[in-house]
Image (cartoon, rainbow, N blue to C red):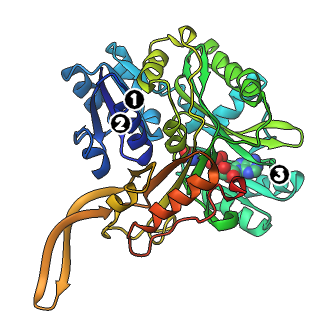
Amino acid sequence: MKILVLGSGAREHAIITSLLSESEQHDIVAAPGNAGIARQVRTVELDPSDPIAVTEYAVDNRVELVVIGPEAPLIAGVADPLRERGIAVFGPSKAAAQLEGSKTFAKRIMEAAGVPTGRAELAGTIAEVEKTIDEFGAPYVIKADGLAAGKGVLVTSDRAAAVDHADYWLEHGPVLIEEFLDGPEVSLFLFSDGHDVLPLTPAQDFKRLLDGDGGPNTGGMGAYSPLPWLAEGFVDEVIDTVALPTVRRLESEGTPFIGLLYCGLVITSKGVRVIEFNARFGDPETQVVLARLVTPLSQLLFASATGGLAALPRPEFALDVAITVVIASEGYPEKSLTGRQITGIEAAEAVPEVTVLHAATDIASLTDAVDAGTWTSVGLVATGGRVLSVVALGSDFAEARERVYEAVGKIGLEGSQHRTDIAARVAG
Ligand code: AMP
Ligand code: GLY
């Protein structure tokens, strides 16, 4: 199949790695990709969020399936003109992507579909914010409505900090005040064809920057899968109480959700609650989920895009466990220092069952000062916050942790940051 993958992160590198591992050979193009993706497939300079440019490329090049990785192209409506031209697209329409793009939209759908979630109130003024947070009590959860790349959410017990955060985001529109949901978080992804869903395997994301869940929220610093502590029947419960009601509600409103439904869940003492929906694969959870996927990914993506999920069995996953550790630039998430050289990837990949997925990487010129002047060469450099996602499989978490951290130790990037406690608790 001729497949166009939009995006440039480790999530897209994981999707492409999974597609390449199938026995069927695919013709894969990535736009724009990154240095790691470019070693494996053809990349094209195309703005993934430009609906016209993407559609023209797909039509001219007879692409059979477009896989939209990140949220920005979905919110920009890239899926719509592609579908109008009869091309199979994995990714919801602009209207259905509001499930991620607007927290207010998501809350409305959940309410209409009877999906369990925390209480939430929209506040348009500081006075409303203060009244609502005092009513809900600490810890306070304040969310900007709309995409804010992980920066719009503050969870804090510091009332003054909560008010400050709300004050800042109120300039961009109303903010959402939510009830604090207490319990372990689970990310469960489901393929959706607009009517039926098929679940992937649960994973856990480590959202905070520092060990022990300290520091600011990030896009995600690591993940593991499966979650051995989940109750039996968890996945079926989420399908019945969260995923299907949501998908059917969107279908009944004339905005079918075709693509990946990301359920961000908390297991509270009162049961499962939705924290958020996303309209695409999660990053870095995808890196561990797809590492364990046995069923050919292309079948699942194509069936989702073409209304064919009812005919497929549930995807199968390996018994092996998977861990990923994200290597981030100095300064992330506030202000990443970029342009620095990355070394040691080959040595890291020589560790058994380890794959290094690229996020923000490029090949660029490096200028080294040497005794007699400067010396210019080309090499791999970091171009953003989250730079690499190192993935290891193992027969248990202790083995996978040993492998992943041995590999992380071989990678050189001045000032880089990573967490050392990914999956530590389950490794025992
Ligand atoms: P979000 O962008 O909505 O996923 O929020 C980012 C992170 O903030 C989540 O993964 C949680 O760790 C935390 N968070 C968000 N909403 C809540 C909530 N209602 N209760 C507790 N933690 C939350
Ligand atoms: N890992 C969190 C996200 O993808 O939104």
Q: Are marks 1 and 2 in contact (CB under 8 Å)?
A: yes
| Marked residue nearer the N-terminal end (1 or 2) | 2
Q: Identity of the amino acid at label 3?
A: Thr
Question: Pointer 1: residues within 10 angstroms few (<14), some, or many (20+)?
Answer: many
**Whether the residue under disc 3 has CB within 8 Å of ligand 1:** no
Q: CA distance from mark 2 to mark 3?
A: 40 Å
**Whether the residue under disc 1 has CB within 8 Å of ligand 2:** no
Image quadrant where residue 420 sits: bottom right
Residue 132 badge: 3
Residue 58 pos. (x, y %): 26, 24
Residue 355 pos. (x, y %): 42, 49
Residue 46 pos. (x, y %): 25, 39
Q: Which residue is pictured at 31% across the width and 15% down the height?
A: 85
Question: Pointer 2: residues within 10 angstroms few (<14), some, or many (20+)?
Answer: many
Residue with the mark numbered 1: 67
Side of 126 where 301 appears, left or right: left
Image quadrant where residue 23 sits: top left
Residue 6 badge: 2
Residue 359 badge: none
Q: CA distance from mark 1 to mark 2?
A: 6 Å
Q: Nearer the viewer, mark 2 or mark 3?
A: 2
